[in-house]
Each structure stands twice: as C-alpha cells, then as structure tokens.
Amino acid sequence: MVLYPNDVSEQGKELRLRQQYFLASASLQDVLRQWVRANGNDFTHFADKNGFQLNDTHPTVAIPELMRLLMDEQGLCWDDAWDITTKTMAYTNHTLLPEALEAWSVALFRELLPRLMDITYEINARFLTQVAQRWPGDCYRQQRMSIIEEGDHPRIRMAYMAIIGSYSVNGVASLHTDLLARGLFADFYQLWPEKFNNKTNGVTPRRWLSHCNPGLKSLITEAIGDQWISDYRQFEQLKPFADDVQFAKRFTAIKQQNKQALTDLVFKNCGVRFDIDMMFDVQVKRIHEYKRQLLNVLHIIHLYDRVRRGDTEGMEPRCVLIGGKAAPGYVLAKTIIKLINNVAQVINRDHALNDWLKVAFISDYSVTAMEIIAPGTDLSEQISTAGKEASGTGNMKFMMNGAVTIGTLDGANIEIREAVGEENFFLFGLTADEVEAIRPEYDPNHSIDEDDDLTRVMSLLESGHFNLFEDGIFDSIIAAIRSHSDLWMIAADFRSYIDAQARVAEIYRDKQAWARMSILNTASSGYFSSDRTINEYKEDIWHRELKNETNS
C-alpha cells in the first residue's frame, strides 16, 4: 500500500516518482559527501573510483540528479559534469515489454522536479544534435529516439535517458540482449553498438542450495567436497554421480523429505494436503499474462476433464502449486488468481480426483517461502511466451535444487537447456521469431476448433463450471484467450504444452530416469551462480577488483 503503490492513479504515480527520486538522490549525495570529505572539490578521478549500476529504469532519475548535484552543488560546468555522469552510470535492462519501461508525464516531472526537467531537456537537445549529425535529415529517427515522447500528453522515456547517460547497457540473458539490440533499442544499438553487452542473471548457491536444502548440501559435500559453495565451477564434478544408483537413491530420498516440508507449508497456507508420492508441479512467480499462469490452468482443467471422463491412460498423479502476486492495478492478473483458486476448489472437493490431481494457490508468496518450495519441486514451470521473459531467476533456483524444467525458448531457459542438455529439459512452444511471424494472422479460435482437448477445456470455462454462482466473472479471461490480438499466444501453444506434459508424465514414472535428469540439473547449475554474474559485471562493466568476491 505504501512501498509499492498502485500507480494507476495520478497520486500513485507521484508517490512512485517521489520514492525513486528520494532514494536515488540520497544515494548520490552520500557518495558525493564522502568524496568531498576525502578529496575536496577535485573531481578529476571521481569516475575512476565510483560507479552506479542502474537496476532497470526505476533509478534512472539519478542521471539528471547527478548532473544537478555536480553543477549546482559542486560548481562543475556542463561538459565536465556530463563527462563524469556518462563514465559512472551503467544501465541494466530487465524487461522486453515496452509498457513496462517507465515513462513519466512531463507535467508531473516538471511540477515535482523542475530543475531536473530543465536538465533533461538539455540532455535531449544535445543528444538529438548528435543523432542529426549521424543521420542527417532523418527527422523520424530523431522523433523515435528522443527522450521526450511528443503528443497531447508528452512523456519522458526513462529507458532512453538510461541508455544516453550510461557507458554500458546490458540485458540479463542471451536472447534478451539480442532482442533488445534487434528490437526495443535497435536505434540506439545502431548508434552505440559498443555500449551493449549481456550479463545473464544468477542466484547465489549459498542461499538457494547450501542454506535452503541442507540435506542435498550434505550429500553433495560428501561426494565432491565443499568447495562448490564458493566455487560454482565445482558443480560439474557431480555429473558422473547421475549414473550412480546409490547416489540417486539418496538424492531421491532427500527430495522426498523436502516434499514433505513443502506439503506442510501448503497445508498450513492453503488447507490442501499434498501427497509426496505424487509429482510436485510448481509455478511460482509474479502473476502476469506473459508468464502464462493461464496456460498452466488450462492444462489443469484438461487433466480434470480427462479424469472425469475416465481417460487416465498415461497420466501421472500430480500436485500442482501456483503462487505469486499481481500488481495492485492489474485487474486481469487478479482475475487469473481468482480462476486458479476456483479451479482448485472444484478439483480438491471432488473425491474422484483425489488420487490423480490436487491444486493449491499459495497466498503471500515470498522468497522465504521459496526456500521451502524450490527444494521440494519436481517439475519447474517456466512457460512464458517466447520473447517476453528477460531472464527469470526462479528457473535457476529450481534447477539448482534438482527440479526439471518444462519451458519455452525464452529468457535464461535457453541457456539452462544448453547447460543441462536438451534431453534433460522439456521444451515446447513457438520460438520468439515464430511468435512474431504468426502474430498478424493469428486466429486462436481456429486453434480451439481444431483441438478436441482445448475445445473441451474452453467449454468447461464458458459453461461457468468453475464459477457457478459468480456469473460472467471469467468472461474477460475467455475473451482474452479467443482474441486475435492475444499477445501471449495461449491457444497457439496449448497443444505443444499438453504434449510436453505427457512426456513429463511418461519419464516421471521411470524413477531412475527422473533421478538422473534431476541430478544433472543440479550438476549443470553452476553457471547460474551469481558469483559468475557479478564477476562478469566486475570485469566487463566496472573494470574493478573486488575483494573476497567468492565469499560475499
């Protein structure tokens, strides 16, 4: 309510901008205070000793604010201040969704931060002069690249400010960076290709294995020693143990213990009792259409329909856990949460389903809960529409704890699949290029009519079976699935997803084969350590020596 306000209203937008400015300015002022105390007003070597990594667009206001502090407070001229700013600011982009790139209204920005508005105009004027020199007469390009988006209600494109004011621009997965350069920031890439680089995200094995999975920690340490905790390259030594029958049995036993802990968490939170002898199929992440919790729900309904029709051949009993939070003003995302809970209620109350399917939505999902969820998960759902997920880090946490991934070629899924081998990853769905290719002529209704399983799922949804006393509550979801402008390609990927889930069930029945895949996922997860990520930032962007880097 306070720290993450609903920014649908003007009051909410103002609060967010106030927060961003306060935090950015306070940080900059603290750094400058320490510098002046040690060096007086000599800023000659400031850029050699200081760097600021802009974590997405939220702190981009730091660029004009540093200019203000250097000029107005420290007395530097524009050129010297800009030289320092552009040698200390570096920008990490975390999204491929244009609507997620912050753009503040000029009116709000001018009212709240008038001096920064003046500085922003000057930055833009000087930059557009540079664009005009590079592409003479290309007024449309100047309009496209301007920090100020003109119109009835002009806006400040903060991502453009971040690129212009930084010496480095990076994405957080290989595909993500490629799509930024080819699409979202193509104009800027043509101007400054040397600025762009990739830094695939990572997670720390200290928290996401050593701390949260003590049983697996002990088993790994017994097998290869404890250096893996601080040296991510040591994970590779686990690979030969994937074919060790006794190791696999102990690995599986630890997974069962972790599943029991997850069962207790789900029961306490949701009142649903999971069965540890069933597959634990988990999707926990922010609720958003592109992350496609809705596709997961359609598969759940498909399984429900099969059991009710007696078509259980080839099925594997599973417990499905979904969790996450929606942004305060994201109505459709909240409706998807409602649908998940309604479907779960129908399934969990149906005794005919007890031996086949259980569903729960965990409320108030948090990283603390994830410390129990990740170790207890068999199947990790990473099913975003290809070309929409920047990276993901939940996929890495699951992998590190031996979960096998079902996913699209999106974000860091691509690198996860490369690391573990395609035979140890359940791939489905359109590629990013295929998504764009079919978009102009996309007809979800044709996909529905051509697929008997999807037709039955949609019939259950549209009949109100999951909202008997809440007439029309899911009409917006149904309309979104059937819309020709559905950006997320739910219907298009349904069949491929269902077929991939069938392969999951087939392999999960072979406990030895599944254990081998699970061990190889853990053994291949070292690359996704944040130690490797930060080392790449250190060497490629910051050009700094960090002390105690493996123990931090």
Image: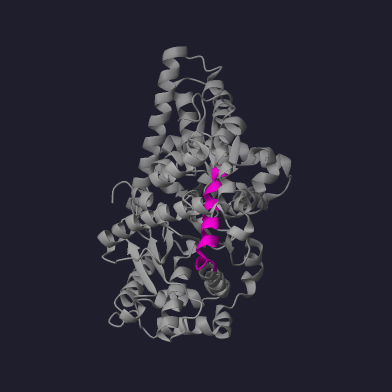
Q: Quadrant of residue 346?
A: bottom left
Tell me what residue is drawn at x 49 percent, y 44 percent. Answer: 57
Tell me what residue is drawn at x 43 percent, y 87 percent. Answer: 309
Total tally of numbered discs in the picture: 0
Question: Eyeballing the image, is 424 above or below 157?
Answer: below
Q: Residue 509 in the image: state x and y as whole percent.
A: 50, 68
Tell me what residue is drawn at x 71 percent, y 49 percent. Answer: 138
Q: As rendered, which of 79 and 453 lies closer to the eye?
A: 453
Q: As rendered, which of 154 and 84 lies closer to the eye?
A: 84
- In which quadrant is the C terminus drawn? top left
Provide the residue span drawn in magenta.
Answer: 507-527
Q: As rendered, which of 202 and 44 lies closer to the eye?
A: 202
Q: Residue 440 in the image: state x and y as whole percent.
A: 63, 71
Please, which colouring scheme is shown? one colour
Q: Residue 447 in the image: state x and y as whole percent.
A: 57, 80
Mark yes or no: residue 520 visible.
yes
On whether residue 509 falls in the magenta region, the answer is yes
Question: Eyeballing the image, is 131 above or below 542?
Answer: below
Mark yes or no: residue 462 visible.
no
On whether residue 447 falls in the magenta region, the answer is no
| Main secondary structure along the magenta-highlighted residues | helix
Position of 533 compared to 207: left or right? right
Q: Residue 540 in the image: state x and y as whole percent.
A: 62, 33
Tell me what residue is drawn at x 41 percent, y 55 percent. Answer: 253
